[in-house]
Amino acid sequence: MWWFQQGLSFLPVALVVWSAASFVFSYITAIVLHHVDPLVPYISDTGTIPPERCLFGIMLNVSTFLGMATMYVRYKQVSALSPEKPKILRLNKLGLTLGWMSCFGLCIIANFQKCILYYIHVLGACLTFGVGSIYMLVQTVLSYLMQPELHSKDIFWARLAVFLWSCSSILSMFVSSVVLYSGLYGQNLVQKLHWDPQERGYTPHIISTVSEWSLAFSFLSFFLTYIRDFQKISLRAVVSLQGQTLHESPRSFRAEEQALLIAGSI
């Protein structure tokens, strides 16, 4: 059995590989068609013009589904490992809520392009990266609280390092974006897809784009830390039949309906 066939480890692997492929394929398509500059464009710029926009959108929608599934499995795993620890259970529920909010933001990014609906796109980015960073923090705290009985210290330090990596990328991207869009380097830079290295504002633009790519891959790296944990868990569905056929109500339901009818007639 291969390592990615153990338990549910294929889920975080599929999430990371598919999401990285969505960025890379869109980037290659946009470069080949000369829609963006080869040197580190914004990730969103590589999904602005058809046909890469279509590819970018559909692949990120699949990433949204994989992300929600991965976060749900993580939630169920922590709940099963710490059923009698209220603090961990509360943080676990908070983590699932934040994680699914981040996935919803990714869905917004996929379907609302930056050059068409800028403010909605920015809202999606804030949900994805801002709320997603808080999700990473919650999971890092959970890893700390569950060590050394349930978690190794190595996993905690790895997640802490990736979380700090994402925070530094967010800070760098925020500061450079504020400087770039402050109005000092011209107006309507949101629509700008091609940059000349001699232009004013090129340096903060490059810092901002590099920070965005760094942030995206820090998120993917965080989910790589789930692989070893997911090798030790599996989920199964339990089917509970309420009747032997699908075209009539179960007897218990019919008995309740008859009782209600009798009570109403009395």
Image: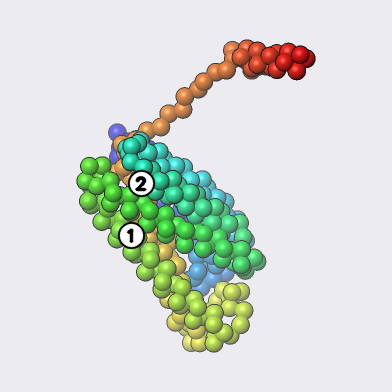
Residue 6 versus residue 158: which sits nearer the camera? 158
User: In screen coordinates, is 111 left or right of 177?
Assistant: right
**Outermost residue toward the right?**
265
Query: Where is residue 174 drawn, in percent x and y?
Result: 46, 73
In this view, 165 is above or below 179:
above
**Outermost residue toward the front?**
266
User: In screen coordinates, is 104 left or right of 150?
Assistant: right
Q: In the rendered view of the protein, which quadrant contains the N terminus?
A: top left
Amino acid on which the number 1 mark rests in the picture: Val
Query: Where is residue 61 drawn, in percent x and y?
Result: 55, 50
Residue 264 versus residue 78: which sits nearer the camera? 264
Identify the image's colour scheme: rainbow, by chain, secondary structure or one colour. Answer: rainbow
The alpha-carbon separation of the residues under discs 1 and 2 comes to 24 Å
- Residue at 33% x, 37% y is 84
Can residue 3 be seen from the camera position used here?
yes
In this view, 49 is above or below 230:
below
User: In screen coordinates, is 264 left or right of 71?
Assistant: right
- Residue at 68% x, 14% y is 259
Local secondary structure at mark 2: helix
Query: Where is residue 47 drawn, in percent x and y?
Result: 56, 62
Amino acid on which the number 2 mark rests in the picture: Lys
Q: Say the numbered circle drawn on residue 87.
A: 2
Can residue 32 be seen from the camera position used here?
no
In this view, 54 is above or below 249:
below
- Dot 1 corresponds to which residue? 162
Estimate how packed mark 1 is, as few (under 14), some (14 to 19) or many (20 or more) residues with alpha carbons within 10 Å: many
Decide: marks 1, 2 in contact (CB < 8 A)? no
- Residue at 51% x, 45% y is 65
Local secondary structure at mark 1: helix
